[in-house]
Amino acid sequence: MGKLPPTICFLLLVLFYASGTLKIKLVAGQTCSEIIGECLFCESKCDKRYPGSTFDCDPNKGGRFPACVCSFKCPKQCKVGGGRCSANCGPQCCNANCAAKYNFGSGYCDNSVGVNLCQCVYACT
């Protein structure tokens, strides 16, 4: 099996970093998961939010009650510029702005072209 291009590795690293903040993570293959609250009515909540998804009640996640974890097919990822990164708006600010603007959005600062730009990655169809 060949090596992944550096850009793909970097995007995966950003997605894994963002998953801690967004409570969304990539798991084996093309499956995503999201914690959507307590386990009460977990199956119906998952099916409503992600038709055809599977669910699990995880006692190790959540607070006093097990967390409802939905697993679903990952949406296609799109990438778009989110402005400039600066001393006033660094990586965390960029990530927060992208998360607020886009469905399952996350952001990172990229200065590979000589200008420190915020790049947003988000779910698109």
Image (cartoon, rainbow, N blue to C red):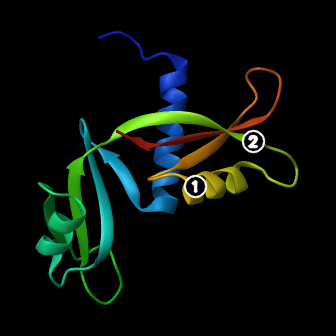
Residue 98 percent across, percent down from the top left: 60, 51
Classify mark 2: helix, strand or loop: strand
Near mark 1 (Cα within 10 A), the count class, few <14, some 14-19 or many ≥20, is few
Q: Residue furthest top?
A: 2
The quadrant in which the N terminus is found is top left
> Circle 1 sits on which residue?
101
Residue 9 percent across, percent down from the top left: 49, 27
The quadrant in which residue 31 appears is: top left
Describe residue 56's horizontal placement relative to residue 100 as left or right. left
Q: CA distance from mark 2 to mark 1?
A: 12 Å
Describe residue 35's horizontal placement relative to residue 89 as left or right. left
Kindly identify the amino acid type of the residue bearing the numbered disc 1: Lys
Q: Which mark is residue 52?
A: none
Describe residue 125's horizontal placement relative to residue 119 as left or right. left
- Is 9 located above or below residue 36 in the figure? above
- Is 6 located above or below residue 76 in the figure? above
Classify mark 1: helix, strand or loop: helix
Residue 64 or residue 95, whichever sits in front: 95
Q: Residue furthest right?
A: 87
The quadrant in which the C terminus is found is top left
Residue 41 percent across, percent down from the top left: 14, 81
* Residue positioned 15% across, 56% down in the render: 53
The quadrant in which residue 49 appears is: bottom left
Residue 17 percent across, percent down from the top left: 52, 49
> Circle 2 sits on which residue?
83
* Residue positioned 54% across, 19% down in the render: 6
Kindly identify the amino acid type of the residue bearing the numbered disc 2: Gly
